[in-house]
Image (cartoon, rainbow, N blue to C red):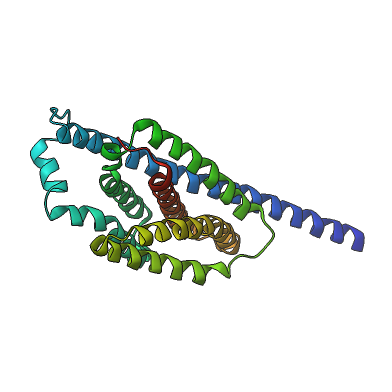
């Protein structure tokens, strides 16, 4: 009798573990799917606007975006709104997502991806298409490797969080400062340190997404888990975009 009870307990434990593993895989797939859709939105907006910006700068007629609108977005003080709008949305999103529904949070995420596309659109007017494609491919390989390591490693890297967060704050401050002083040495330092910070954040955020799911999987709070997937996708998306831009600044070939 005791052996039968022990067998049933072991069997139940195996079933629970299998259910959690299956749920975790589904959760991670959802995170990466949301991130991928956001990347597509960003890429489409950046390509359309950036291509027309390049045409306007070379005196050619634009295909979709009117020259007057391009002049407003990139030739006036409004360009600062485009530059800093994604950052403002991230802070507002993080502070209010707990009060949002899942559908609202997802919509805000898509809007953020579109704003990021506007902010990045100038790269298509500055760098060659081949250079952008090559850098994206290299970034994708590096990101996938770092994220896979963060997911599979047995090492607890949660202690990296505060250090990496302070690194991000320092990078933001230094980047804003360099807009006004235009120091090439500071720009290079921000680029190199930024790559290290966002590489670390990719692994850290992946492990955090995994651990958060494992902690909350048994609560039955599906709404929270849905929004958790969006926040996880947002974090990984930001890491990818920043790694891509920093690598492009180092290795990109200008038009």
The image quarter containing residue 50 is: top left
Residue at x 38%, y 54% (from the top left corner): 102
Residue 5 drawn at (x, y percent)? 85, 61
* Residue, far left: 68
Residue 190 drawn at (x, y percent)? 40, 60
Residue at x 49%, y 45% (from the top left corner): 32
137 sits to left or right of 14: left
Q: Nearer the viewer, residue 23 or 72?
A: 72
Residue 236 in view here: yes
Residue at x 33%, y 42% (from the top left corner): 42
User: In the rendered picture of this protein, how many numbered marks are placed on residues?
Assistant: 0
Q: Which of 204 and 105 is in front in this view?
A: 204
Residue 239 drawn at (x, y percent)? 45, 53
Q: Which of 191 and 41 is in front in this view?
A: 191
Looking at the rendered image, the quarter that the C terminus falls into is: top left
Looking at the rendered image, the quarter that the N terminus falls into is: bottom right
Q: Which of 75 and 91 is in front in this view?
A: 75
192 sits to left or right of 62: right
The image quarter containing residue 78 is: bottom left
Residue 246 drawn at (x, y percent)? 41, 50
Residue 99 in view here: no
């Amino acid at each position: 009798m005791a052996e039968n009870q022990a067998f049933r307990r072991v069997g139940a434990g195996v079933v629970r573990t299998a259910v959690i593993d299956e749920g975790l895989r589904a959760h991670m797939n959802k995170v990466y799917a949301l991130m991928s859709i956001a990347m597509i939105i960003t890429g489409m907006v950046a390509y359309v606007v950036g291509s027309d910006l390049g045409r306007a700068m070379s005196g050619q007629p634009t295909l979709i975006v009117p020259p007057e609108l391009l002049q407003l977005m990139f030739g006036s003080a409004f360009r600062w709104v485009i530059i800093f709008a994604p950052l403002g949305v991230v802070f507002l999103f993080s502070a209010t997502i707990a009060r949002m529904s899942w559908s609202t949070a997802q919509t805000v995420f898509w809007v953020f991806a579109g704003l990021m596309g506007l902010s990045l659109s100038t790269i298509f007017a500055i760098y060659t298409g081949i250079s952008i494609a090559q850098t994206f491919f290299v970034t994708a390989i590096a990101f996938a490797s770092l994220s896979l390591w963060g997911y599979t490693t047995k090492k607890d890297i949660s202690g990296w969080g505060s250090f990496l967060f302070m690194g991000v704050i320092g990078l933001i401050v230094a980047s804003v400062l360099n807009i006004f002083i235009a120091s090439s040495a500071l720009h290079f330092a921000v680029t190199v340190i930024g790559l290290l910070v966002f590489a670390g954040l990719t692994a850290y955020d992946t492990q955090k997404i995994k651990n958060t799911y494992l902690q909350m999987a048994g609560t039955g709070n599906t709404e929270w888990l849905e929004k958790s997937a969006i926040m996880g996708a947002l974090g990984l998306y930001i890491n990818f975009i920043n790694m891509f831009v920093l690598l492009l600044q180092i290795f990109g070939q200008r038009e």
